[in-house]
Image: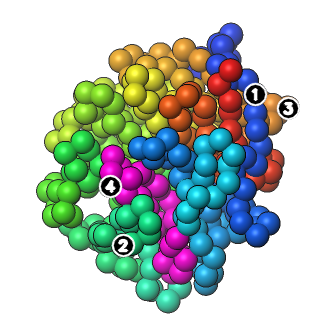
Amino acid sequence: MQTAVVDPALGKLPNPNPKVIKNWAMLPDSRVWGSTAGVDIGPDGQVWAYDRCGVNTCEGSNLTPIFKFDKASGKVLASFGAGMFAFPHGLHVDRDGNVWVTDGQRSKDGTKGHQVIKFSPDGKVLLRLGKAGVAGRGPDTFNEPNDVITAPNGDIFVSDGHSGQQDNPPPNANARIVKFTKDGKYVKEWGKLGSAAGEFRTPHAMAFDSRGRLFVADRGNHRIQIFDQNGMFLAAYVQFSRVSGVFIDRKDALYAIDSESNPMRHPKWRTGVRIGNTQADKVLAFIPPHENGAFEGAAGEGVAVDFDGNVYAAEGPISRPSAGGGITKYLKP
């Protein structure tokens, strides 16, 4: 784990998105947001996100968790997924507009959780990976899957294991990337719990750059690890802090959001969005959290950027109270 690096956000970095719109996305029927960590941009430029059913879980709820929002107004364009999740965690919209969501925890009755579900744009279930309610480490099971992403050829990558960042991880904690064909056939996996190259302490989010390299937010190790699509380790970036969410735009700008740094978990580092380029471990700009009074502040857990450069933060359980809603929008002038 890196400890000697000084936070570049403590210096004078430009803020390219200075205007903040709190509680940007409005849920229907005056529904109040719970927490979220998943936000992405569809091929039509509209914004997708989920809500954990008004609280921090969908356990026992029939509220709809998955939403498509108009990028201009924040109004709901589509919604689905009621009664299908225990704890939605990662969200990805592929090139065809299909929506992928990970379900990171087991429901009490064992009928949900530890799965990845692929939906059509109108909410039809197209594919399931993992066994509902079954935690495991095999080719057909997950234990707290964090995120999912698809490569240009359709191959599927799942980052599996949320508990590795704990001081004393449980013995069954996963810390791996699992690769499948576009049809869901297991191909391979890599990674284990640890801090060496190719090891993870909570691989929390993923993104691809234009070269097809896979960027993994290795949150518990305060870094981004970069791999080829066969799992070969290529590099580690340590300037982007304790990364919860990562997004790469069409020009290979790299956005990394830190929602957890504080004097206990990651001292002397600020939460917020660090912006760089996929080619180098260097932070070029910084969007501070929406609450700037405290040193650590409060920032979202997921991040996405639309085609106009507007940044969207998905507000997790740490930042949701001060954010005033589930999605904060940082406007590009």
Dot 1 or dot 4, earlier in sequence: 1
The location of residue 180, given as percent across then percent down, is 20, 57
What residue would you read off at disc 1? 19
Within 10 Å of disc 4 (Cα), the crowding (few <14, some 14-19, many 20+) is: many
Dot 1: element: strand
Depicted 125 relative to depicted 224: above or below: below
Q: CA distance from mark 3 to mark 1?
A: 17 Å
Residue at x 42% of width, y 52% of height: 92
**Marks 3, 1: nearer the viewer:** 1
**Marks 4, 3: nearer the viewer:** 4
Residue at x 76% of width, y 70% of height: 29
The location of residue 257, given as percent across then percent down, is 57, 36
Q: CA distance from mark 1 to mark 4?
A: 34 Å
Q: Label for residue 293?
A: 3
Q: Label for residue 158?
A: 4
**Residue 81 within the magenta-colored segment of the rendering:** yes
Q: CA distance from mark 4 to mark 3?
A: 37 Å
- In the rendered structure, which amino acid carries the disc numbered 2? Val
Dot 4 or dot 3, earlier in sequence: 4
What residue would you read off at disc 2? 125
Residue extent of the magenta highlight:
80-107
Q: Is the C-beta separation of discs 4 and 3 under 8 Å?
A: no
- In the rendered structure, which amino acid carries the disc numbered 3? Gly
Q: Which color scheme does this rendered protein use?
A: rainbow
The location of residue 83, given as percent across then percent down, is 53, 81
